[in-house]
Amino acid sequence: MQAWQAVRLERMQEFGMTDDHLTGFPVRFWDVYGKDGIPVRVTISEMGSMLLARLLNLNDTQEGLLNLVFKVADDNGWHLIDLKDLKAMLTHVADNAKTYRTQYGNVSPASVGAIQRQLLQLESEGGNDFFGEPELNLEDWVQTEGGRGVINILNAQKLMLSPRLYSAFLLWFLAEIFERFPEVGDLDKPKFVLFFDEAHLMFDNASSALTEQVEQVVRLIRSKGVGVYFVTQNPLDLPDAILGQLGNRVQHALRAFTPRDQKAVKAAADTFRTNPNLHVASAITELGVGEALVSFLDEKGMPNVVERAYILLPASALSPLTAEECRASFESDVLYRYYKDSVDNHSAFEALAQLEAQQLAQKAEAEQDKAKSQSAQSSDKKELGALDGFIGGLSGGRKSRNQGMAYDVADALGSQLNKQATRAISRGLMGVIKNLLK
């Protein structure tokens, strides 16, 4: 018997529970990189410029340029799906900076270069796997099997090594749910519940605008029938504005061995509604395995006083799945066949390639027309030069008295024609001379 099995048996006996409590649940595994779960993909356009700027760690000037790129793409109907689309748009905007300056604003070459460098880093972190199609359909996360809701687990073991990518996905996911789920009012129980582990990563170095946006979503998402739980080591890891929107709180043990730790414990205790029969700061440090301080909303939506409580024993196994068990699970899932392979649809990259090809063809055609025009002008000059020489010969002085009257006529005619050499001289000159010489 494994250690966790012994603990479970002890707790079951303590609470008078039988084996009927133990059961499995329908589970679906997801993975941004597609290695340890069904692939999760998002398009650049759906991510949006604000979250993408946070993901790329851009300053205000660089974020402004990114907004410009999104606007140009939107105005021209060029879809931004993956990273190659965004890179192509940056190159296009930089190459046509003068064209876009009047309507959209200045395009800084330094900002373009900075964004390109950040994109290279994002690619090295697996950004090419995350951005693309088919895009995640949120309806696939709201499924039931046998009357029980499917538990969707995002494998973040590798994703956690890229905190900015992890936080960007969580923020996008939260915003997408708020935007796409319909209003359902105050339900007896939510139809969808989110648990964001390591939630502090969502707000590390976040701008005030982004924090305000998340606060608004958290405040209003209840009417969508959605519950949101932020899982973190210490409640103070979350901004006060977000913390104030959270009604249900479960606090596990915190250890305090230094004055700094003790200060953190006291601050965590102060986030609960006071219970005169419980010293919260002391209780936090004394909690054992399976114990927590809890405070939930009452029927009127007010937080109850904090209480010390036991956590109900999980009905499922406590040991993690092996890699083979996990792979067998998601590869047999019906959704895996749909999301498995990425699809490269027509987007900004292809549209800009076509535009460039058209521009090159037009340039080549213009150069060809110019060459033909120059060739024609050169030919005309040669013909006129030959005619001028011929006329000059006719209009020259008579070399001997025996050259005849034809030269006198040609002399007069040559003087007249020299003055009008540019007028249709090639059409009738030879005919006139022939008639005069008859």
Image (tube, helix red, strand yellow):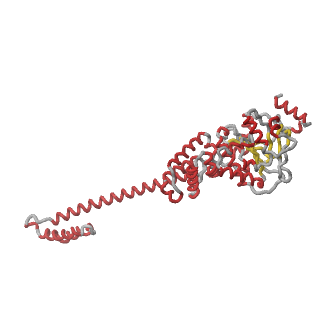
Residue at the limit of the structure toward the left, as seen here = 401
Image side of residue 220 versus residue 381, left or right:
right
Residue at the limit of the structure toward the front, as seen here = 259
Q: Is residue 11 above or below residue 438?
A: above
* Location of the C terminus (image quadrant): bottom left
Report whether residue 302 is seen.
yes
Query: Which image quadrant for residue 409?
Result: bottom left
Query: Which image quadrant for residue 425?
Result: bottom left
Where is residue 20 shown, x and y percent of the image?
89, 38
- How many numbered discs sit on the rendered protein? 0
Residue at the limit of the structure toward the top, as seen here = 1
* Location of the N terminus (image quadrant): top right
Residue shown at the point (23%, 61%) measured from the top left: 386
- Viewer-proximal residue among 31 and 70: 70
Where is residue 121 shown, x and y percent of the image?
58, 41
Image side of residue 289 versus residue 84, left or right:
right
Query: Which image quadrant for residue 130?
Result: top right
Where is residue 402 shown, x and y percent of the image?
8, 66
- Viewer-proximal residue among 186 and 208: 208
Report whether residue 339 is seen.
no
Residue shown at the point (51%, 49%) measured from the top left: 91
Where is residue 42 shown, x and y percent of the image?
65, 48
- Viewer-proximal residue among 172 and 354: 172
Residue shown at the point (86%, 52%) measured from the top left: 299
Image side of residue 379 versus residue 150, left or right:
left
